[in-house]
Image (spheres, rainbow, N blue to C red):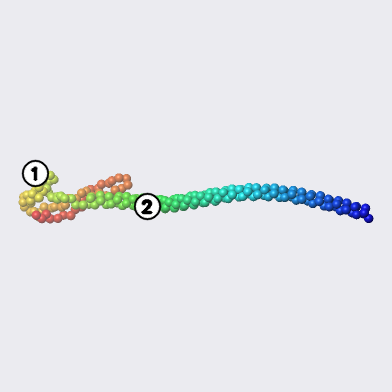
Amino acid sequence: MPGRKVRKSTGIVKQRRNEDVGLAEELAGAEELTGSEEELAEELTSDTVRVGQKISDLDTVLREIREFRRETVESLNAIREDIRKANCRIDETEKRIGDTEERIQYMEEATCELIQFCKKLKEKQVDQEGRARRDNVRLHGIKEGAEKDAESVSAFVETTQRKVRAASSIRTRSGTRTQITRPSPSGWCTAEIHNSKAFKLQM
């Protein structure tokens, strides 16, 4: 009986020792796990800091990109407005040029018509000058140049009328220029045509 109790106590002691060893191992493993968790926490914290820094950098880059985009849009809008104004000025200039060309063409046509009209007027003027009455009087039967010694033509006519017994026999007519025909394309042609109206000289 006593031997059985000793063996039983020895077994209990060994079992307790084994349990203590296992517990110590578990505690050591727990401590190792705790150290690993701390290292992981530190690494996670450092990674979080790095990620935050990168996010901050990305935010800065994004702000710069947005600012650059805004400036680019403003510049493009200004360029677009300048182009629109330039196109408006070009359209207005083209319209003015077209109107000016039309006016020039109209003026050229009107000038050609005026030249032709002036040419016709000149021909009519020359013709009328050839047919117009002149400021002189012709006395038939009196030599040309007989009035050169008289004071005036009227005095010469009065003197001549007194000398001539029958004043009614004196034939007078107005002097006209030599009539001419209309100008021909080859040059000027002049013809002498005497066609005047006789009238009585009244003093």
Residue at 9% across, 47% down: 152
Residue 47 x/y as whole percent: 65, 48
Of the numbered discs in the image, which one, if any, rests on residue 149?
A: 1
Of the numbered discs in the image, which one, if any, rests on residue 103?
A: 2
Of the two numbered discs 2 and 1 in the rendering, the one whose residue sits closer to the viewer: 2
Residue 45 x/y as whole percent: 65, 49
- Residue type at mark 2: give it: Arg
Residue 69 placement, left or right of 194: right
Please name whichever residue, 34 or 4, is drawn nearer the observer in this view of the structure: 4
The secondary element bearing badge 2 is classed as helix
Residue 64 placement, left or right of 195: right
Residue 87 x/y as whole percent: 46, 51
Residue 66 x/y as whole percent: 54, 51
The secondary element bearing badge 1 is classed as helix
Would residue 91 be visible to someone looking at this image?
A: no
Residue situated furthest right in the rendering = 1
